[in-house]
Amino acid sequence: MKARYGSSPLHLLAHLAALALAAWALLQALQLGGWERIALWLIGAVVLHDALLWPAYTTLDRLARRRRPAGWANYVRVPVGISALLLLAFFPVICDKGGATYARVSGDTYDGYAARWLLVSAALFVVAGALYLVRSRPGSGSSS
Amino acid sequence: MHAPPGPFRPEFWKSPLRGPWLTAVLGSVLLMLMAIVALTGFLSHAAYQPDLGRNALVGTDLPFTTFFDWPTGPSWLYAFTQGLHVNVGLFALPVVLAKLWSVIPRLFQFPPVRTPAEGIERLSIALLVSSTGFLFATGIVNMQYWYVFRFDFVEAHYYSAVVFVAALAVHLVVKVPVALRAYRSRGVLAPLRQGLAETVQEPDGDTVALRPDPPTVSRRGLLAGVGAGAGALLVANVGQSVGGPLRSVAFLAPRREGGFPVNKTADGARITEAMVGSDYRLVLRGGANEVELTRDDLLGLPLATHTLTLGCVEGWSTRQTWTGVPLAELARRAGVAGAGALLVESLQEAGVLRQATLARNQMADARSLLALRVGDADLTLDHGYPARIIVPGLPGVHNTKWVGRLTFSA
């Protein structure tokens, strides 16, 4: 059994139990209105990460590191990473995507989100630049 | 059989940081965060009391989700649990991305499946990643009112959370031993003491690079970067949950303006001035009894004032001082003192949340009000004039606005 299956019976039983519960939940979800879109979002989440997000940031990172001294990249990585993360998590408010619904339910409008995101990003780049200047001066110790 | 070129070949992978210890640390942190997010998510499900009246928003429910009465104290209970759900969820986003980065060579392993055990394991991983991505994506766009998904958020989020919990449980069965082995052989915290100069590859593990580049960052540097990203997301949003001066610091939170946000405007709910004018009557029902009260009648009843927090499922909250008639008093007037259930119906003609059913413990709490005033003024139309429910600890939308009828039953 072990040789042919590749692991213990416990491994198999644990997976069968989890898959059965997951299958129940997926079957419920696929009976809902718009089930095609639910399936699309379930698959899309993996595809977007594995085929778009991960290749994009790895490629950018490799380009940024090319022929530069070690340690240089981090001054760019950190502020760009945080800025990109804010955009990823708050894309709807920054790009005014839920604006119409928001106005209808709250009586308010999405104002200044893109501006605040840009200003915070600018501040991050300035701070990182200043740190780089201070730390790269001769005589100052560099850290990890 | 040769692996295709690119990421399917082991020499493609260059980072000297990847390895079982790094994955174990990211996984351990993520486990703690996701335990909070999942627990508060299912608590929110319970807080809607789906077993009462027509409260249920999820069609086919698991049988063990509501085995207790949702308590009424402290009044910020739901604001707290749901604030945790949304903010810890945001905080966890960069940890999820870093965790995926640390194991992504496994996605391209060649051949993809060597044994049936590996096949079933990879299927469960696919479900784990897929449900995680789904939960984060739908949660994030939903809290910002971008209903681009065009399916029922509550049901889809609930069922995918069940998929997530099932897939995570079996992932833990398989991977906790691997993580413990890594902690035992490398030390739990020892690798954190290595600066950039001391950063070398982990000695073994299937995500360790065959031909690594020199390190550009230490492991503690990577973890600090992930933490900085998580912290930035938290600062950008948490003020709308905590309130006070922090609200304006929350520079990307949808509910950063003013201290008393409106969840749904009268316009959005199709409530008109005519519906709440001099013809307005509150209908009180208890058994065969039916009493009609004008707003002035209500103001003539014994009133109580309490400062209570209103927490929204989207993670924001507001704390206000409400004045109104205690629900227990209205139950007595309806002839059902100590009522066991209360069906609250809004003047609003459509919408799933135009009605809600409250439980015995919620009516028994002296702070549960049919509120008429907030602060020093009458409720505004957008906040539910002429009368709205406010029950401590109750999810925001169950504090029904523009109340038209209260039906008490024993």
Image (cartoon, coloured by chain):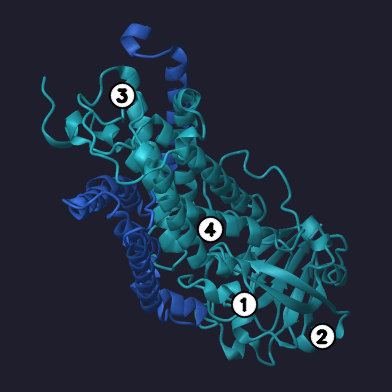
Are both tags, 4 and 2, on one chain? Answer: yes
Q: In the rendered structure, which amino acid carries the disc numbered 3?
A: Gly
Q: Who is closer to the viewer here, B197 or B389?
A: B197
Among the two numbered marks 3 and 2 on one chain, the one whose residue lies closer to the N terminus: 3
Among the two numbered marks 4 and 2 on one chain, the one whose residue lies closer to the N terminus: 4
Which residue is under mark 1? B347
Which residue is under mark 2? B299
Q: How many marks?
A: 4
Q: In the rendered structure, which amino acid carries the disc numbered 2?
A: Leu
* Image depth: mark 3 or mark 4 in front: 4
In this rendering, the answer to whether B130 lies above or below B44 is above
Which residue is under mark 3? B119
Q: Chain of mark 4?
A: B
Q: Residue A123 at what x, y percent from top left?
A: 39, 72
Q: In the rendered structure, which amino acid carries the disc numbered 4?
A: Asn
Q: Is residue B126 left or right of residue A61?
A: right
In the rendering, what colour is chain B? cyan
Q: Residue A86 at what x, y percent from top left?
A: 39, 63
Residue B66 appears in the picture as rendered: yes
What is the residue that sits farthest to the bottom in this orientation? B278
Q: Who is closer to the viewer here, B385 or A126?
A: A126
Q: Chain of mark 1?
A: B
Q: Secondary structure at mark 1?
A: loop
Q: In the rendered structure, which amino acid carries the disc numbered 1?
A: Leu
Q: Secondary structure at mark 3?
A: helix
Q: Secondary structure at mark 4?
A: helix
